[in-house]
Amino acid sequence: MGDDGGRAAVMRATAAVFAAGRRSGSAVLVDDRHLITAAHVLLRFDPDTGAKALVEEVEVEFPAGPAGGTACRAAAFRLDLGPGSGAVDVAVLDLGAKRPAGLPGPIPVWPAARMADRVAVFGYPLAEGPLSGVWREFRVGGPTTAGAVQLDWVGDAGTFPGHSGGPVVDPAGNRLAGILVEGSEAGRFDRFLPVTLIARVWPPLPRRWLMTGAGQAEASDHFTRRARGQRSAARGGDL
């Protein structure tokens, strides 16, 4: 599952979502003020209309808090993603311009269009008492007709209620590949929305420039060395 530091960073950046005072799912911090979750996590019964509707305000709690810190809890408001977002099970939560005290750092976003062969999912199952979170690992099965990506179970269990909206990451680099939106115990699969689809609905989603090469480290080093220039005084010190 990659390095422990990267895994701990994912846990710190993942929040439990409380809609209408009840815990309803998970969300993940992607920049200094925005979290992504599944839209169905925000659905609550509206007595005025007699139907379910998306709530406008929720509370989010980061049980792991920043490194070495304590849990952070804050109010968050749902952004209006426009009329085209209704067909996609995604919501963006805004913590506001003033950064809440104790807010952890965001999770880096997977830069490539191609998915990893295996992924890991983290979130806070509703059956948990004290929030510690649960990891699950999956094989990537492939895209579905709705734009989601199917995850085939590796073991005897998949995700649990409450995992919805939680981060799906590549195990090697612990970067956000998408968010969990669906599961089927009978079919032994889960599904997630990839960041490529999320970015179409919410273009401000932070995504790193994709560097290619024999390996990510080699590609990064290639551009870093050229950005610094040739510093040897004996060879002219060309910067």
Image (spheres, grey):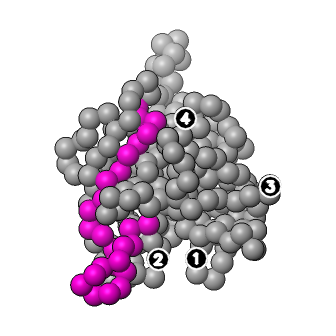
Q: How many marks can you see?
A: 4
Disc nearest the viewer among 1 and 4: 4
Q: Nearer the viewer, residue 14 or 108?
A: 14
Position in image of residue 138 (x %, y %): 72, 56
Q: Earlier in the sequence, mark 1 or mark 4?
A: 4
Magenta residues, start to end: 41-66
Position in image of residue 211 (x %, y %): 57, 48
Kindly identify which residue carries mark 3. 155
Crowding at dot 2, Cα within 10 Å, few <14 / some 14-19 / many 20+, comes out as some
Is residue 94 visible in the rendered structure shown here?
no
Kindly identify which residue carries mark 1. 147
Instruction: Look at label 3 and name its amino acid.
Output: Gly
Q: CA distance from mark 4 to mark 3?
A: 23 Å
Instruction: Look at label 1 and name its amino acid.
Output: Gly
The answer to whether residue 175 is above or below residue 233 is below
Q: Earlier in the sequence, mark 3 or mark 2?
A: 2
Position in image of residue 183 (x %, y %): 64, 69
**Is the residue under label 4 in contact with that under label 1 (CB below 8 Å)?**
no
**Is the residue under label 1 in contact with that under label 2 (CB below 8 Å)?**
yes
Kindly identify which residue carries mark 4. 8
Kindly identify which residue carries mark 2. 88
Position in image of residue 113 (x %, y %): 60, 62
The answer to whether residue 177 is above or below residue 100 is below
